[in-house]
Image (cartoon, helix red, strand yellow):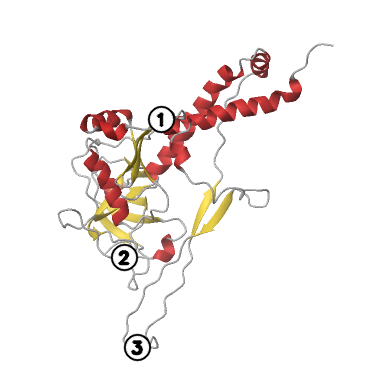
Amino acid sequence: MPNNFDSNFTRKIARAFLDKFESTRVMSKNVNTQLLSGQFNEGSGENVDFKRPTDYKSNRSAGGDMTSVAPDSIISGKATGTVQDYFTVHVDFNEADEALKMDQLDQLLAPMATRIVTDLEVDFAAFMMKNSGLLAGTIGEGVATWDEVATAGAVMSSNGVPADDDWYYAVNPYTQKSLAGVQRSLGAVDPLVKTAHEKATISDDFAGMRVMTATTLASYTSTALTDRAGVIGSIDVTYLTAKDTMTQSIACTGFEAEVNTIPAGSVVQITGRNRVNQSTRQPILDDTGANIPWTGVVTTDASTTAGGAVTLIVSGPAIWETDGAHNTTD
C-alpha cells in the first residue's frame, strides 16, 4: 500500500503558517484585541458594539444642596468592532502537497505569511492614519530628534489619554537612522529576541512611548497649494451626535478653486478653538505657555464643488456644550 500523508495535512499547514504569521507581525501586534475575543459568532453578525465610558460634571456648593442645579444627562455612546475583508494567498494544492511530503513546508509558507502580514499591516496603518485626531510635530517634516518623540508623549498625556497600556510611536527606517545619530544607547534591546515585533523596537520606554520602526506605514498624496485656508460653515458640536462614531461633519467653503480632493489623512485645524484635557477639562498649554489648537483628521476623501465648497468628515470631534461633561475644546 502506498504512503498517504493527507490525514495530517491541514494541521501541519496551519501550524507552520501561524508560526510564520505571528513572528512577522509588527504594527498589528500592538492592538489589544481582548474586547473582541470570542465576540463574533453566528448570532452577532459582522458588528459588535461596546459601551463608551460615560462622563459627568461635578458641582460645588457649601452644603451639598443640589435642588437648584440641573442634573447631568446620562449619555451612553458606543464603539463598534467590524469584521473586515479576508486576506488570502491562493496557490495550487499540488505545490503545497509536494512541499509537505518533501519536508519543505516552512520554505513554501513563509513568503505567503509575509505577504499577508505586509498587506494587513499597511491596511491597518492606513486606518490609524485616518482615525487619529491628535497632532504632534509639523506636517511634512520628518522626525529628526528624540525631542519630537517626546512631544508625541506630551500630546497624549496632556490630552488625558489613559496610560493603562503601552503607547506606541511608529517611525520609518530613515527616522530610525536620524534618531540613532542623536543617541545610540536608546536603541539597545535584548539581543536574544527573535520576533519581528521585538526586533522593530528602538526604545521600550521613552517619554511614555514605545518607539518602533516599520516599513508598512501608510501615506497619502495631497495637492500642492499656497492657500489651504477655508471658511467654516455649519458644525454640530454636541456629544450626542458624535458619541457613536467619534467623527464630525464640517461644512467649509473658500478653498482654492483648483482643489479637487482633500485626501483622507489630511489634518484639519480650527484657528481660535483650542484643546482641553479630557480628564481635567483645563486648556492644554505647550512649553511656551501657548494654547494647543484643536485638530482633526479627515477620515474619507472629500471632493470640492464650485467655489471651493466641501464637507469634511473628521475624527476626534470638536465638542463644546455648556455643561462641559464631554468637551474637547475650550
From the viewer's perspective, tell me whether residue 147 is left or right of residue 110: left
Q: Which amino acid does label 3 sit on?
A: Gly
Earlier residue among tags 1 and 3: 3
Q: Which mark is residue 63?
A: 3
Q: Residue 280 carries which label?
A: 2
Earlier residue among tags 2 and 1: 1
Q: Which amino acid does label 1 sit on?
A: Lys
Q: Which amino acid does label 2 sit on?
A: Thr
From the viewer's perspective, tell me whether residue 65 is left or right of residue 155: right
Q: Are the residues tagged 1 and 3 within 8 Å (C-beta)?
A: no
290 or 151, nearer to the observer:
151
Tell me what residue is drawn at x 24 percent, y 30 percent. 178
- Whether 40 is drawn above or below 185: the answer is below
216 or 268, nearer to the observer:
216
Q: Mark 1 points at which residue?
A: 199
SS for dot 1: helix
**Residue 16 sits in quarter:** top right
CA gap between label 1 and label 3 equals 59 Å
Tell me what residue is drawn at x 64 percent, y 29 percent. 14
Q: Are the residues tagged 2 and 1 within 8 Å (C-beta)?
A: no
Q: Where is residue 88 in the image (x, y as percent from the top left)?
A: 57, 29
